[in-house]
Image (cartoon, rainbow, N blue to C red):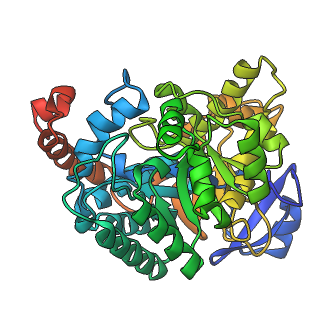
Amino acid sequence: MTMGSAGDLRDGAVAIRGRTIAAVGPFAELTATHPDAIVVGDEHGVVLPGFVNAHNHLSEALICGMGEDMTLFEWVARIIRPVGWLLDDEMAYVGALVKGAEMLLSGTTTVNDMFCYTAARNLATLGVVRGLEEVGLRGVLSFGAVDSGYGEEAGIDGDVVDDIMNEHELLAAACAASQRQIFRLGIGVVHAQSDRLFEAGIAFAKRNGFAVHTHIAEVREEITEAHIRWGTNTLGRANLHGLLDCEIIAAHCVWLNEHDISLMAHKHVNVCHNPVANMILASGVCQVSRLRAAGINVGIGTDGAASNDSQNMLEAIKCAALLQKVHTLDPRSLLATDVLRMATIEGARALAIDHLVGSLEVGKRADVVRMRGDLPGLANIHDPYQRVVYSSGPADVADVWVDGIRRVANGAITAGDIHAWVAASKPLAADLVTRAGLQDRSVLARRGAHA
């Protein structure tokens, strides 16, 4: 399943040389032209491009599983904001190892991460670069900066705009010096940035040619608040300040009207749909079919490690299809072929990296997933698209290559000791939620970090 010009190849194969794809074609042909190659796989599995997780928050890596009874604004105020003051480089590094491994094990090879926290002087985002480089995941990384609260000041001590802009610059430099990380200018949420920070970030992106990662129209309260404050919604504010003139991916885009959709199509705004998080937080349903019909490119994301509670990309792909079907009462509204394209080539296009990844084509980076056909999940493949979308899980992901390096082999992480990473995360998570005053919500914190 190439997701590229070659289409689907029965008895097909991919040849990897170094970091890139050297050939794609029939297995017999490739074995004849590459007689000394090591062969991985058999005739029963499925080979496809690595998944592109188009929206995520590794800042939530240590706080999964809290606050399922809250709406987004409640959850941010009671969970995210208290934690956001405390995150540091070490927490970000270990969180990126643990959740990066979880993503790899479900076939993700690229993640578009926005690290959202309020202690800019801690430079925690630099830990994400270290973690993703070590685990071997390709990243598009941003700092989800905010300097005001949801309807009220967040209580940040003094003017932090200079600190925030400094972290943007340092993160950009760290990404430039890395092997697989790409920088984006992060605007945490449009309605939680002061005019000064909003304008400084947009100017920084335009001056340096950086693309932007933000949230737009996630919940109804956001739209109401924006109209009260600015006389327009958050998309309108973004447009008035020139943000939509940048290369941009906007997460969620649930509460849009027809004018908004036309504007986004005109401005070539890319969207990331996050079905699982939208359902957990009861935010609403993104009009994916309507957006795609308008010519808007839509990718799929897991969203954060706490707003979703899972980094299983296969789950997000399945839920994307099911949510549209039940919302529209039309089984044809979003098909398995559609969501797999959204999770691969269209997700890559949303991040402006489709020249590098997203399809199995000669010259592209060798980001490849092999799903095994010798377990129940993919036994008896009739329609491979439907089987991958509706039947498979992480147990069916046998091998994952990123940049030509085999990062998952026979279902196991190759870059390090995943059990050691998990063990290292426990005391950090317990300490974090305790200092944030959330220990009553955490069995781990109450029982001790080594429970």
Q: Is residue 443 left or right of residue 408?
A: left
Residue 277 appearing in the image: yes
- Whole-percent x, y for residue 193 in the image: 41, 55
- Is 433 in front, or is 42? 433
- Whole-percent x, y for residue 199 in the image: 48, 67
- Whole-percent x, y for residue 50 in the image: 64, 55
Q: Quadrant of residue 34?
A: bottom right
Give the quarter of the figure containing the C terminus. Answer: top left
Q: Is residue 15 left or right of residue 416?
A: right
Point 48% across, 81% down: residue? 176
Rendered view: 288 above or below 158: above
Q: Quadrant of residue 160?
A: bottom left
- Whole-percent x, y for residue 144 in the image: 42, 57
- Is 440 in front, or is 225? 225
- Is 411 in front, or is 235? 235
Q: Is residue 379 left or right of residue 30?
A: left
Point 11% across, 30% down: residue? 446
Point 49% across, 51% down: residue? 190
Rendered view: 178 above or below 74: below
Rendered view: 125 above or below 77: below
Residue 336 appearing in the image: no
Point 69% across, 55% down: residue? 269
Numbered marks: total: 0
Q: Quadrant of residue 351?
A: bottom right
- Is 358 in front, or is 300? 300
